[in-house]
Amino acid sequence: MTVAALRGRLLPPALAIVFAVLLCVVVVLISGGSPATALSAMVTQVGEGTTAVDIVNSAAVYYLAALAVAIGFQMNLFNIGVEGQFRLAACVAAIVGGMLTLPPVLHVIVIFLVAAVVGAAWAGIAAVLLAYRGVSEVISTIMLNFIAIGLIAYLIRDDTFGVLQGNNISTQPIAPSGAFPGISLGGGGTVFGMVLVSAALGVGYWFLLGRTRFGFELKASGISSTAATAGGVNARRMVIIALLMSGAVAGLAGLPELLGRDMAYTLTSPAGYGFTGIAIALLGRNHPVGIAFGAVLWAFLDKAGLALDNVGIPREIVLIMQGSIVLSVVVAYEIVRRWDLAAEQRRVAAELAPADADPGGGPAAQAEEGSVRS
Amino acid sequence: MITVGIAMFALALTATLTGQNELTSSGTTQAAVGLMLPILLAGLGGLWSERAGVINIGLEGMMILGTWGAAFAGYNWGPWAGLVGGIVFGALGGALHAVATVTFNVNHIISGVAITLLGAGVTQYLSALIFEPISRNPRSSPRVEGFDSYSVQPLADWFGALEEQRIPILSDFGGLLRGVLTGLSPLVILSLLLVPLSYYVLWRTSFGLRLRSTGENPYAAESLGIGVYAYKYAAVIISGGLAGMGGAALVLFPGQLGYLEGQTGGRGYIGLAAMIFGNWRPAGTLAGAALFGFVDGLQLRAGGEAVHALLYGGSLLAVAVAVWWLARRRWVAAAAALGAGLLVYLLYITTDTVPRELAAYAPQLVTLLVLAIAAQRLRPPAADGLGYRRGEGG
């Protein structure tokens, strides 16, 4: 990879994070707090209790959700429905896992399969609607997110598959044979075993999309479905496969917590990872390493931000930071792209200058520069 | 008007034939109007923005910003200030979306998702900072003062009397109309007036024509000397203002006055769905919002049995559509409608009730069905969601 290409990839996220940090510094100053205290509180928090392990565990979950989103992005598909897919998958996997009694390893495999299939099926509805009826996947997956919430509430009712546990309602707990063993660090907490699965999926994602013919066809049909069709790729099939894969990975995103800690799905089970996944996939630019970095950053902000309440700064500032990172990273990519384009045009213009009397490189380059300045 | 009449008649007939009087009771209608407002306003917001070619998934975030602005201004200076506060905060979110999508050409969906995240973050931070010292709860504001509500007298009482009579069909009409005519606040009237106003401005003024031209073909508009950026900015900021007003409608909702974290509950997205349901037209958006609001109000007041009765109404409607297609000699369409009607009827007689949890999401299911059936006949603006850079037209 050339230096210029590396710069093009790393500069925008760095700019975005710097911008977001500056913004938050200003916000903290306006609301009467001290940014330095806030930062040191967050950094020291990492060393305390189980925070470091919590960050790793959360990052694993975010990584899966972001991978699911990134698979769609590779094909220009916006799978807003990761949220619904992972929640429904976790719920059904918990129900099936709770009803079965199987030997240890087999039990986990069955739960994995159920989660992946349910996630894929839920995304598959959007895929079929898009491929055969031309329904935008953005709208259909948003609607499916809502319907998934209703379906989950119905499925864990105590007269369907739920059981009352005190004040909370949950699915039948999964037997210990279905647990995914973690790595215990004593007082530091327990690292989910699923962290390794997340990493392995990241490698698989990198290989599949970057090193196989299938990955090439997928990306090609995302860039131009007509060109891909001309090259012998069935674009409709690609749409369906991409969304099914995205849904299957999304389905796994609920499992680290289900099989590593909760062992049952309840009404208060975590939610919101789908939208976090979108943010992280954007930040990581769909690259497996970039996504990993984004996931750790997000998890750090989430977990270390809890310490802010102790120093009198509302911890919700972290949400502002996360939101502004996402927005500024996409703007930064665009600015850097225009920058490079303008530089390229200047360079070409300079090379052509002796042959051509126009030093500005023609009207196009001038327009480009003009809009960068504005 | 004809559509409204048909819809009311279908409802009245269904209520009479199934004995589910809640379907047309004034209480249900009144609740439906209240629940419809935020969705309608978000839908109109989506309409303005998409007519200028900018997809606005960020409506949800702008609405969330609007709830905070409305609660803050409403708590300090009364309901009218609350309304303005909601609009201003929503418009700020809209302006941000405009900067990202119009100036920087960021993908519209990405910008929308980011604005929803950012809007929620800013709102929760401000709420913890400003509301917590007063309300002792970072997740809610102190109670704000609402609008007074009025009834159109003596019409409301006449229809009320008619509703009490329990004459089949006629009383149902009485209940529906009474619900619409009682408990009216300035906010309700203002919001409903925005529907014809949006139509008038967008379709009957030169400003609207130019705005829509930037959503159909910005380069053609540019060639005619229209400042495309300015129109897109105006449209997206108005869009944010409308979404923020939807947030204000939630905060000033008579049942529960004030800001509450998560109170938008995805209504921004539902507004977008209502707009698509309405084929990117103001009246259609109103119909979509009314459908969502009605089903929501129905399941809140009467639960799954009443929503179940709607299935019966749906099969009636399908048969009517089948007859319509038959008269126009469209045999295949007629057969399809009849088949669908039969299927829904079978579903109706084989079940007793729709589970409450699912009934709440019936509108989303209907939207999905409508999209699946009619996606090819919907007509979004031609350049909806596409990027535009001045001077780069082919």
Image (tube, coloured by chain):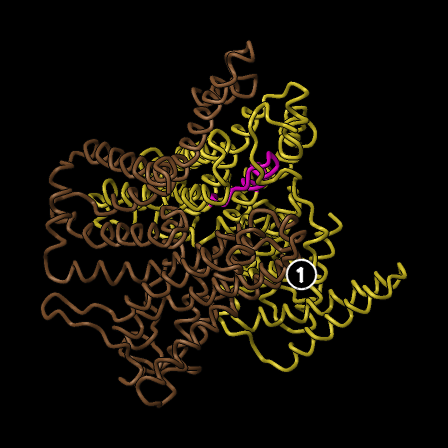
Query: What's drawn in magenta, residue-wise?
Result: B44-59
Furthest residue toward front: A355
Instruction: Name the residue rendered at 14%, 44% in the picture.
Output: A312
Where A105 sits versus B282, above or below? below
Where B21 sits versus B210, above or below? below
> Can the viewer see residue B30 in this picture?
no
At mark 1, the secondary structure is: helix
Q: Residue A294: x and y, percent?
A: 31, 50
Q: Is residue B53 magenta?
A: yes
Colour in which chain A is drawn: brown
Q: Label 1 crowding class (10 Å Cα cut-off): few <14, some 14-19, many 20+?
A: few
Q: In this view of the protein, which residue sits in the foreground, A4 or B256?
A: A4
Residue B315 placement: quadrant = bottom right
Furthest residue toward top: A357
Q: In this view of the protein, which residue sits in the foreground, B113 or A343?
A: A343
Q: Quadrant of the C terminus of chain A?
A: top left
**Type of residue at label 1?**
Tyr
Q: In this view of the protein, which residue sits in the foreground, B51 or B283?
A: B51
Chain ID at mark 1: A
Instruction: Name the residue rendered at 24%, 69% in the picture.
Output: A192
Where A276 sits versus A325, above or below? below
- Residue topped by disc 1: A132
Residue B51 placement: quadrant = top right
Instruction: Name the residue rendered at 42%, 73% in the picture.
Output: A115
Q: Residue A364: x and y, percent?
A: 56, 21
Q: Quadrant of the N terminus of chain A?
A: top left
Q: In this view of the protein, which residue sits in the foreground, A310 or A224?
A: A224
Colour in which chain B is drawn: yellow
> Can the viewer see residue A355 in this picture?
yes
